[in-house]
Each structure stands twice: as structure tokens, then as C-alpha cells.
Image (cartoon, rainbow, N blue to C red):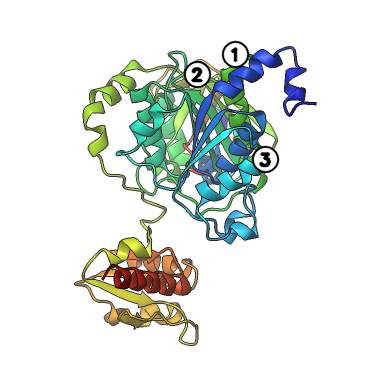
Amino acid sequence: MTITIKYFGLIAEVTKQNEETIDFSGQSATELLEYLFLKYPDLKNKDFQVAQNQELVANDAIITGQELALLPPFAGG
Amino acid sequence: MSRYHRHITLSEIGQQGQDKLSAAKVLVVGAGGLGCPILQYLAAAGIGTLGIIDFDVVDISNLQRQVLFGTSSLGQNKAKAAKKRLEDLNNEIIIKSYPEELNYQNAIDLFEHYDIIVDGTDNFETRYLVNDACIITNKPLVFGAIYKFEGQVSVFNYNNGPSYRCLFPNPPKKDSVPNCSEIGVLGVLPGIIGSMQANEVLKMILGIGYVLSGKLLCYNALTSQTSVLSIRKIEDNFHKVLKNSLVFHKKPLNINCDVDIIDISIMDILQKENIQFIDVREHHEQPKVDNLKITYLPLSELENHLDKINSGKEKAIFCQSGIRSKQAVSILKKYNITNCYSIKEGASDINKFIKEQHKTSFNVR
């Protein structure tokens, strides 16, 4: 299945893009993250939450949607 | 024509709505990049009681985005300087300034006096403190945070909605996300995000439109894209905070900025004992600091003279403005030399403080 992943803040700096579309055959967000950690090793030690179809989900959620997002916390003010 | 004519003309607001704004009490935590536009619009809108808490002083590098301040405010406490500016903007409202750090000891009492809390802080430790204090006092929290060209806005703890912990349950692992304000930021970005926060405050008080509760708005200034993500309430996050509410006021505040660089004021450092004071300015730079025993170690020579660092003492490092002293702390950390503080003030302010302290102790005698 084709999914689009959006990256925010410092996550986008690691992946060097704001979004990408990939062909993904796995089931869960965990599998997707494993794939992304291989592709972008620096992601591993970053803090972020996963959103699926504009809704925050647990890291082991089943992937049903076409759009995912990796959202880091921001501290600045 | 009245000050609020353009509000009252709106059928959604009217005199009744304006009276609601006038009766409202809003506390803004932090008068920095976010706090300035938030305060500016809330004061202009006629929020009846506006509280400002910030311990920090205005630095020239703040003026690129902190629009309440000017060159005449340099060195002044931000809460006080903001109050002065806002009183000129609107003399019909009450503005209270708290020139102090928000911590676990004062947060609950302070929050009790307000209806809505607005987060304009710049570090995770204080953000979680603000969130938890809002849960304990049951106050809605208007959240905003920025990173370089991007911002996040949400309203937490509102009408049984989620909290910041439902979005990010715990503070990030140390060093995994830049903390505090050492990274760059596009000056207009906090203006946009802070204005969005002020908008949420007004909507909540007026009871109009849709409040960003249960939603996180993400804005990218470079792409002009906005994404809105849903956040679900996780009850457990509230229980955990409430369970610990009785010991809340006993917690120490431990703000780790960036790479563990510990900023400290000369006032606080002089209360410590067994300190090695290190001047990292070049040899020709004036004024020298009087009345303290100083080790002179210019930043350019620091790495060649690590033997001059006293491992048995805490190190208080200073320079002309507090920037090179931070660099020195980072360099020393590379060599595993810890217990280093960067003094916020520059040499001339340190001299001034010591002189004043001498005067005071003389007067007491």
C-alpha cells in the first residue's frame, strides 16, 4: 500500500524532507518505524509521536490510513 | 468613540462580550517571543486582569522578535518591562507583573488567581510544570511552542479535554530535543503562534467559534501549511498528576538548557561557597572584575590550559555578555569537566552587583 509520511520539526531535519510517499507492505506502525529507523538511523534517539490520518495513535497501531505523521515536541517560546 | 468600538460592533461580541473580556483574568507564563504578542493582543482586547510572570531580563538578541521591548528596556526584567509597555497600550485594565521564576512552589497559588493560563515558556521542564499545575488547579491551558520555522498550538484541560501529557506523556530524553532558546527562530514565527494563542483565549472567554481543544495545530512558516491533528484524552495522565498533587510543591525545578549549560545569576553564585571564578575574555578586555579572586583563561586558550581548572571546586565562568561563558561550559563538558556554571551577567554588571552588595552590607552595619 502507498502511504504518505509527514515529518515535522527536527524529524524533518533528520529525514531531510517534509514528507515522502513510500510503498509499505507491513501491518503496524511499529513495522513502519523499524523500516524508517533503518532508512534514517538518527531517528532512533529522537522523541516523537505518531499520527495516522490526522489522529494521534500508539506506536503499535495497525496502519489503516494513507497518511502518517511523525510529530516531535517543541520547547521554544 | 470607545476604545473597544470595533469589538462591540461585531454581533458575535457586542457590549456583553466586551464585558466578559473585562471580567476575565488571564495569566501569561513567559514574556518572550510568544508572550509578547499574546500579551499585546490580550491587553489591547481589554482583558480585565492580565498577569505576567518572567524572571528573565531583556537582552538585545530578544528584540528581533519580542515586540513589547525596545532598546530602552535592555537589562530590565521582562515582566516589569512588559507591564510598563502594556499600561501605555491600555490603562483601563489591571496588569500584574511577577518578576520571578515560575516553580513548583509558587505555581499553584498563582494559578488559583486566574481563569486561563497561557504557556509562553521556552523549556520542557516549565511546560510540564505549567501543564500539571493546570490539572491540579483545574484551569484551561492555552499552549504554544515553536521550533525554527514551525509552531504548535493547542488548548489543554478545557471542558474535560486532553492535556499536554496526552500528546507527549513525558518530557523528552535529555538532549534529544533542543531545549531553551539557543537555536535560531524566524522572528515573525512567535508573532504568528502567539497571536493564535491570544485568539484561543478570546474565543474561550467570549464563547464563540471552536476552541482548539483535543486538537494540535501545526504551522510551518516556510510552506505556509497548517495541519490539525486530533488528540485523545488519556485519563491515566490526569490521575498520575492528581495522585502526586500533595507533594507537587516540594519538587525542585531543574531546567536543563541545551547541553547542560547551567545559566546562573551572579546573585545566586555568590551564595555558594568554594567557587572558582573564571574570566574567559581575552586579556585586553575591560573592565576587570574587582573584589573576587579570578582565574584568567581566555576562551581562545581554554583548551590548552585545562590544568588551571580546579577540579575540587564548582566553576563560575563569565565574559562580557554571557555568550562566551556558555561556550566555555560546552568546551569543558567535552573534557568531562563538570560543575561548571555560566554567569548570566557580563563583567560590568558583576562589578555593579558586587559594589551594590558592599554598599548594602555597609549600610546595615
- Residue depth check, mark 2 versus mark 1: number of the one nearer the observer: 1
**In terms of secondary structure, where does tag 1 sit?**
loop
Label 2 resides on the chain identified as B
Say above or below: B357 vs B88: below
The quarter of the rendered structure image containing the C terminus of chain B is bottom left
**In terms of secondary structure, where does tag 2 sit?**
loop
Q: Residues within 10 Å of mark 1 (few under 14, many from 20)?
A: some
Q: Residues within 10 Å of mark 3 (few under 14, many from 20)?
A: some
Say above or below: B143 vs B175: above
Instruction: Identify the residue at image location x=32%, y=75%.
Output: B277
Q: Amino acid at mark 1?
A: Gly
The residue singled out by tag 2 in the image is B214
The residue singled out by tag 1 in the image is B207
**In terms of secondary structure, where does tag 3 sit?**
helix
Task: Give the Cα separation between the discs numbered 3 and 1.
Answer: 25 Å
Q: Earlier in the sequence, mark 2 or mark 1?
A: 1
Residue B324 coordinates in the image, percent (x, y): 47, 70
* Left or right: residue B10 compared with residue B179: right
* Left or right: residue A69 compared with residue B170: right
Q: From where the camera sits, is residue B221 visible?
A: no
- Residue depth check, mark 2 versus mark 3: number of the one nearer the observer: 3
Q: Earlier in the sequence, mark 2 or mark 3?
A: 3
Q: Which mark is residue B89?
A: 3
- Pick the front one: B340 or B199: B199
